[in-house]
Amino acid sequence: MRKRISLLLATLALAGLSGCATVQGIGTDLQKAGTVIKSSARSAQANI
């Protein structure tokens, strides 16, 4: 069972990274994710 989970996680990681052809692409993706998180946090804070 553990081997299957490890294989699944490795496959998901490779699939995620395959969308980024370069290190710059990875940086851009992480920056976009950070922007979404920041926006969500600001929205949640404004609703408090």
Image (tube, helix red, strand yellow):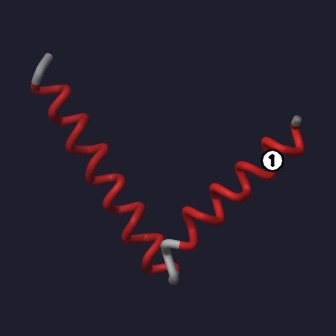
Q: Is residue 48 above or below residue 8?
A: above
Which residue is painted at 10% across and 26% down in the image?
46
The picture places residue 2, in percent across and down from the top left corner, at: 87, 38
Is 33 left, or right, of 41 in this rendering? Answer: right
For the residue pair 12 and 32, the one nearer the viewer reads as 12
Q: Indicate the amino acid at tag 1.
A: Ser
The picture places residue 23, in percent across and down from the top left corner, at: 51, 79
Q: Is residue 42 above or below residue 20?
A: above
Q: Is residue 22 above or below residue 34?
A: below
Question: How many labels were placed on the picture?
Answer: 1
Q: Residue furthest bottom?
A: 22
Is 22 left, or right, of 8 in this rendering? Answer: left
Is 34 left, or right, of 39 in this rendering? Answer: right
Where the C terminus falls, by quadrant?
top left
Where the N terminus falls, by quadrant?
top right
Which residue is painted at 80% across and 52% down in the image?
7
Which residue is painted at 55% across and 62% down in the image?
16
Q: Residues within 10 Å of mark 1 (few under 14, many from 20)?
A: few
The picture places residue 32, in percent across and down from the top left corner, at: 31, 60
Q: SS for tag 1?
A: helix
Q: Residue furthest top?
A: 48
Q: Is residue 7 above or below residue 48?
A: below
State the residue position of label 1.
6
Question: In which quadrant of the rendered view does residue 31 lie?
Answer: bottom left
